[in-house]
Image: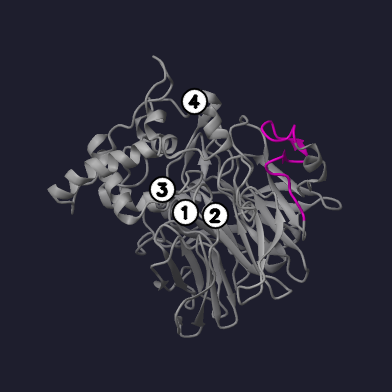
Amino acid sequence: MARIARRGTLGVGIFLLVALAAATLPSGCSYIELPGGIVVNFPGFSGKPMADADIGQRVRVPEGFSIRVWASGIESARILRFTAAGDLLVSSPGEGKVFLLEGDTTGAGHSGGTRVLLEGLNLPHGLWIDGDTLWVAETGAVARVPFDVKARRVTGPLDRVVRGLPTGGNHYTRTIAIGPDRRLYVALGSSCNVCMEEDARRAGVLSYALDGSDERIFAAGLRNPVGIAFRPGADELWATDNGRDLLGDDFPPCELNRVVAGGHYGWPFANGARVPDPDFGADNAAAVARSLPPMHSFGAHTAPLGLTFGDQLAFPEPWRGAIFVALHGSWNRRAKQGYQVVALLPSGKDKFREEPFVTGFESDNEVVGRPVDVAPGPDGALYVSDDFTGQIYRVAWGEGGRTVLDPGRPGAGSGAAASAGGSGVSAPADPFAGASVKERQQARVTGARLWAESGCAACHQPAAPGAPYRPLVLLRAKWDVTRLTKWLAAPKPPMPRYAFDDAQRRALALWLLESF
């Protein structure tokens, strides 16, 4: 089992155990330790939106800054892009949608309203606006669509100019940017924790002509480069990268890289600054030696995602010279780490000093938020997406203390009641609502087959008495068939996305609810 977890995907069995049954941990236990050195300390997939008072009490920003909730209710909020009209686009892979959040035109301190701009997409993640064209990266394609910024609507059909991107396995997100050279850049992660990829396009950055032709591998050896951005005014592509798992609490580091054409950044042969990987380094010494070290190393398992540059913000020095990075937070570590926005301040040539900027999303092993992306707003403020609570935060300079929106404003309250697992989701009245007796009977066959074919049972059946993991239990106390089916369609990393169709996912969800 350890070999599977190291060299391939982590496996649906392990992650179903952790994510769906996290509420069953014994009191006082903060992590699960599985055979093969696998440590899991996972905060869950969702949490309740913070009440206004909670933000001022829990979340901290440097002196002179303020933070407030700018919008709520965007499930799995990920990538942020502002339009020329001051509206904010937000991708939601779990919903298959792109939302448009109207700008604050009245000075109320929050978005003027939310609408669905695009829907029915396949795990949309990356966004880019180029004049009157909106670009959207799905897991297997990149599409463009005519977009009337002033009218706040798309005006034509979706055109998937890039098709056939590799899918499946771990790391389904795709992030995009159009560079100063007028080419399209697409970042995509590996299919596994550590392995030799069959498709060389994975774990790196691809480049295309804007019509989708002339595919090139721009850079490689980036295990999971979720955040990419060109430095304003310079022909420099920068990318965050999530280091591999299962090598202990404090190794390897996650990374910030300046990405150059033809560069190889180490994975799977090297970690960090040319440290040979224990699985693939010894037999690939030449690849280790020529790998490019990171520009900055973050803590292990902190999961850096979105990044932006401070010179686009109405911030004072030294913050204007910083690179801001959202750390989504660890899962493969005994003590949680990350869960904040940090500022990388220049400290000599090609060196940075990491300073906390927005903190308090995790305290004493309790998580109340997971930053994903950071984006400069037209007002000079920094906007932060949070896929844990579905909120967007606004961080501004010189606007008073940490007061947030009026408590009575719709959408700004404490959110749904917390469940036993702390996810903010109440126990379902009927976990099988909408499923007929016949469908449930058929699911007992189909779901059991999918469970067996995916190897889930091996991860839930103790190898020996006293094994430190348990079968899934009490799923019906937290999940219903609709929510569980939806979750299986867009699991959050590091769980891989399996190539099930909608009917198979629903059958598996029904079987899980019947069985556990």
State if disc 3 and disc 2 touch (CB < 8 Å). Answer: no
Specify which label sits upstream in the sequence, 2 or 3.
Answer: 3
Q: CA distance from mark 4 to mark 2?
A: 27 Å
**How far across and down, in percent of the image, does residue 474 sit?**
27, 34
Tell me what residue is drawn at x 73 percent, y 73 percent: 180
Q: Which amino acid does the dot numbered 1 rest on? A: Asp
Q: Which amino acid does the dot numbered 4 rest on? A: Glu
Up the image or down, 269 lies above or below 282; here it is below
Q: CA distance from mark 1 to mark 4?
A: 26 Å
Q: Residues within 10 Å of mark 1 (few under 14, many from 20)?
A: many
> Which span of residues is magenta-colored?
263-283
Q: CA distance from mark 1 to mark 3?
A: 7 Å
Specify which label sits upstream in the sequence, 1 or 3.
Answer: 3
Which residue is outermost to the right? 349
State if disc 1 and disc 2 touch (CB < 8 Å). Answer: yes
Which residue position is annotated with label 4? 33
**Residue 127 sits in which quadrant?**
bottom right
Specify which label sits upstream in the sequence, 4 or 2.
Answer: 4
Up the image or down, 151 lies above or below 187; here it is below
Point out which mark residue 372 bears: 2
Q: What SS does tag 4 mark?
A: strand
Which residue position is annotated with label 3? 46
